[in-house]
Amino acid sequence: IKLWLGRFFILFWGALLLAAFGFLRRGVPDELEYPVAAYVAVIGVMVYRAAARYEPSCGAESYLSAVIGAVFFAASDFLLAYDRFIHRVDAARYLVLFLYYIGQIGIANSTIFPDYKPPSTPAKRAEVPATTAKAKAASSTASAKSGKKGARKRR
């Protein structure tokens, strides 16, 4: 069922983006048509990735914050484009900033994982250095023997 919902969301979101671009396209100058289409696609991918990033270990609060933030961010950009290309809105300046900052707060808040529990991994045993008396004696005997061999070779 999760795969079905994901495919439905992609189709729904794609249709919504095409409708938004089609609506904005009538006021966009010809030389800006491709850049605006690219920007709509990038914003669409951002919202899709926010919706597709659900990870149970990060918690639902983080997930919802990212999705809501991305949607508010996209809404601020749509309102900005509507104001610039279709019809002037009196309070657009304030509404765009309001939606933009709410979106940024949501996206930033999604990086805080209050319920995050890292996956458990088996603990590795640390190597204990050989510092016993036998190890010290063995190393000093080995160095003494190598010293004698070196002295014989030099003569």
Image: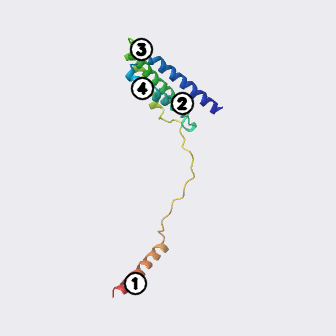
**What colour scheme was applied to this rendering of the protein?**
rainbow
Q: Marks 3 and 4: in contact by CB < 8 Å?
A: no
Q: Determine crowd level at label 2: few under 14, some 14-19, many 20+ residues with C-alpha closer than 10 A.
A: some
Q: Which residue is mark 1?
A: 149
Q: CA distance from mark 4 to mark 2?
A: 26 Å
Q: Disc 3 vs disc 2: which is toward the camera?
A: 3
Q: Residue 43 in the image: x percent, y percent?
A: 46, 28
Q: In terms of sequence position, does the residue under pointer 4 or pointer 2 come before the other?
A: 4
Q: Disc 4 vs disc 3: which is toward the camera?
A: 4
Image quadrant containing the N terminus: top right
Image quadrant containing the C terminus: bottom left
Q: Residue at x 47, y 76 (%)?
A: 138
Q: Residue 86 bears which disc, if any?
A: 3
Amino acid type, callout 2:
Ala
Q: Disc 1 vs disc 3: which is toward the camera?
A: 3
Q: Is residue 75 shown above or below 54? A: above
Q: CA distance from mark 3 to mark 2?
A: 29 Å
Q: CA distance from mark 2 to mark 1?
A: 72 Å
Q: CA distance from mark 4 to mark 3?
A: 17 Å
- Where residue 124 sits, quadrant-wise, is bottom right
Q: Which residue is mark 2?
A: 51
